Image (spheres, rainbow, N blue to C red):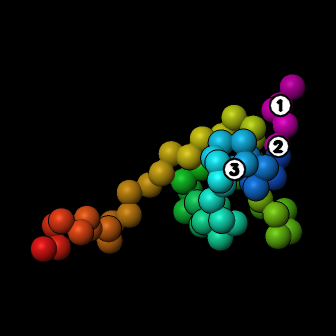
């Protein structure tokens, strides 16, 4: 049996206190930073309960110390 999918906001509330803003969660979903990837249905994202944020290094990111 496959695992249950929950709303992205519910997933975030279980993992973070306080949870990140919805804008951030949607960006993570779009950019592939959550694995397994969330599924979009209408304006909502659904994600497996055991999904994890893996993060993806941004190619344009430079730490402030390297800019000095």
Q: Position of residue 35 (x, y in %)?
A: 60, 44
Q: Position of residue 27 (x, y in %)?
A: 60, 66
Residue occupying image coordinates x 48% and y 51%? 55
The mark lying in front, picked from 3 and 2, is: 3
**Magenta extent:** 1-5
Task: Please name whichever residue, 63 or 45, is drawn nearer the observer in this view of the structure.
Answer: 63
Residue occupying image coordinates x 32% and y 71%? 60
Check if mark 1's residue and mark 3's residue have beta carbons within 8 Å.
no
Task: Please name whichever residue, 47 or 15, is drawn nearer the observer in this view of the structure.
Answer: 15
Disc 3 to disc 2, C-alpha distance: 13 Å
55 relative to 20, above or below: above
Check if mark 3's residue and mark 2's residue have beta carbons within 8 Å.
no
Residue occupying image coordinates x 72% and y 48%? 13
Q: Which image quarter is the C terminus in? A: bottom left
Residue furthest out toward the top: 1
| Residue 46 seen from this side | no
Main SS class of the magenta portion in the image: loop
Residue furthest out toward the front: 18
Disc 1 to disc 2, C-alpha distance: 9 Å
Q: Which residue is mark 3?
A: 12
Q: Which residue is mark 2?
A: 5
């Amino acid at each position: 049996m496959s695992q249950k999918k929950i709303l992205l906001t519910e997933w975030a509330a279980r993992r973070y206190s306080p949870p990140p803003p919805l804008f951030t969660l949607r960006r993570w979903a779009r950019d592939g930073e959550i694995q397994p990837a969330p599924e979009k249905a209408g304006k909502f994202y659904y994600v497996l309960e055991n999904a994890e944020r893996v993060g993806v290094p941004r190619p344009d990111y430079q730490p402030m110390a390297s800019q000095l």
